[in-house]
Image (cartoon, coloured by chain):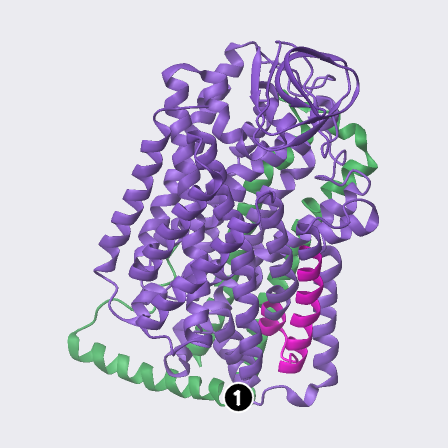
Amino acid sequence: MTERSEGNEPQQPPERVRIDVAARRRVRVDRTLREIEEQTRVGEVLVQGLIRAQLSVALRLSAVVAVLLGGLPLLFAVAPSLSDVEVLGVRLPWLLLGVLAYPFLFTVAWVHVRQAERNEQDLTDFVDST
Amino acid sequence: MDSPFALPAIVLVTVVTLAIGAYGVRFARTTSDFLVASRTVSPGWNASAISGEYLSAASFLGVAGLVMKYGADVLWYPVGFTAGYLAMLLYVAAPLRRSGAFTLPDFAEARLGSRRLRLLCAGFVVLIGWLYLVPQLQGAGLTLGTVTGAPYWLGAIVVGVVVTANVATGGMRSITFVQAFQYWLKLTALAVPAFFLLLVWRAGGTDSLTAAEVPVFPTETMVDIQVDVSVNVVEPVSLVADGVIDGTAVDGPLSWAPGRHDIAQGAVLTFPAGAPVPHADQLDTLDNATWGTPLSTGGGHPEFPLFATYSLILATFLGTMGLPHVLVRFYTNPDGRAARRTTLLVLGLLGVFYLVPTVYGALGRLYTPQLLLTGQTDAAVLLLPGAAIGGVGGQLLGALVAAGAFAAFLSTSSGLLVSVAGVLSTDVVGRGSVAAFRRAAAVAGIVPLGLALQVVSLDVSVVVGLAFAVAASTFCPLLVLGIWWRGLTDAGAAAGLLAGGLLSTGAVLITVLGGARGGWLGVLLAQPAALTVPVAFLVMVVVSRLTAARVPVDVGRIMVVLHAPESLGVHRRAG
């Protein structure tokens, strides 16, 4: 889960060198950050790209929930006989809404966390590499 | 049910809650500690605390009560209560944390730079908080009355005073420990008796829950009528009555023909085993097969079940993000990434919890059907262990659920009070000092207590659902548009808040005061979200477009702060 979060620290080199690298890295990151904060063209594009990516993840997953979960009342309205189907002794609507809805919501949330963190990591990696 | 263990269990929960609160006080030193626990709470603790705070009387008692009354359609309540956190995760959690604001009004001011908008938000925070607090205190009155026979007002006052004192002295740091403890207590208190209930049900031959027959009394049943009630008799039934029935004093056997009968407070009715249960007249008498079928009741709106269902879905899915006591807790995450992980864990914890109330709702029709006669199905969770299991075991389990119910009132009211008091102390009185927070907590607790004592017969879950509708019609559009749309202006936000807020609050007030129950108007007023949420979004967008010149000049910088990951370091300087 956290394999990426500590990836910025390389193998510990000798003390003097490490401070040197860190200092240089900080200057570099600061410059990039200033770009972002001052809304230079590059900075604006960078963050707008991230916002678009995050929004598209959220909208796509919302659509999945709207169709698969939000479609259930319509489905039961269109095909009432579905409500009489029994699975493992439980009627289908009760199984879907009373039990399966919860692992479904958790799975969607898990996918979102992964994708959102990946989008952010992509931006961080890009900033580090410039 | 008179369980001798119930009162000690309730006292124990209350004392332990206070003790954990007192332990936490030692850590709470500055205003920042008080309000947001200095942002050092780990996702595991935080998720338990959020869930503990969130699972209120509506979840612990109300969901089972509604399921018992209305069946398949109201399964959307717990699904929606959970899915609200998914909407929160997808659109709000991480950016909100990164905004660095303490409260919703903070967010509005930081995003749009308007003091007046900030005050408007503060007003809605207080309104939603109070709307949500009233049914908590009422649930407390109902619980204490059910398990001990104490008068209604006593339970409401006990919870009101304990919570106000705890919040005023401990603040949120202690609340985090308390809330985390409360989640696990509530889960245990509901799940353990449910397990035994299922065993009893299986041992008794696994009676069908959805056969084509109306609920019947399983054994000879004595029903105490605590509030005047009218019932609808569908099949002739004979009973023994002692009290005032249909306006005349009766003491002895009685037989009821189909039709309506009025029973006065204080009457005691005894029904023989196997008699069909007369239903309170605001309930349709459903056979169990109809009860188990979706779109048969629409949760009390049988004429428009599809509209009622979708409106409920909209209110609960989108309302959670606008509940003040939920939002304030996201500031205790160390960063945006932790805010996301916390939300994910919350979805898991809630999903586990909400598997259980349905069991009570369904078994309630078998073992405590007299609640369909009195209409007080909110008591199903409290009465089932004693009714179905009996003996010392049933009494002990009954005490356990009573303790869990009290935990639910204590934790949710505490969370609501912290956020209402936080907003009052920073925006209305004082500058957010510890003393101001304490004074505000006292004020924030007294007002809803007064309301709860005035209004006696509101249905717990329905009122909570209305609070969701108001939140979905106000803060949901503000947060979603504020986080994702650069074009939002202070004027647009204010117009949208007012449009959605006034419409939904108006609908809530009319419903609560007993106006329009049937027809299109009735369902629109009782489930307003399908209309008011789109209106709020639309007004916010259109007015923002018309006032595009008011878009904050630094909107680009704000967007960076909201969305850039902390690893870039922009938040150190921006915050």
Q: Main secondary structure of the magenta part?
A: helix
Q: Answer above or below: position of A48 versus B28.
A: below
Q: Answer above or below: position of A90 versus A11.
A: above
Q: Is residue B18 magenta?
A: no
Q: Residue at x 60, y 33 (%)?
A: B227
The stretch in magenta equals: B479-508
For residue B301, which quarter of the picture? top right
Residue bearing the label numbered 1: A39
The C terminus of chain B sits in image quarter: bottom left
- Report the front residue among B242 and B525: B242
Q: Position of residue B309 (x, y in %)?
A: 72, 45
Chain drawn purple in the picture = B
Q: Residue at x 52, y 79 (%)?
A: B109
Q: Position of residue B282 (x, y in %)?
A: 72, 35
Q: Residue at x 27, y 71 (%)?
A: B30
**Colour chain A is painted in:** green
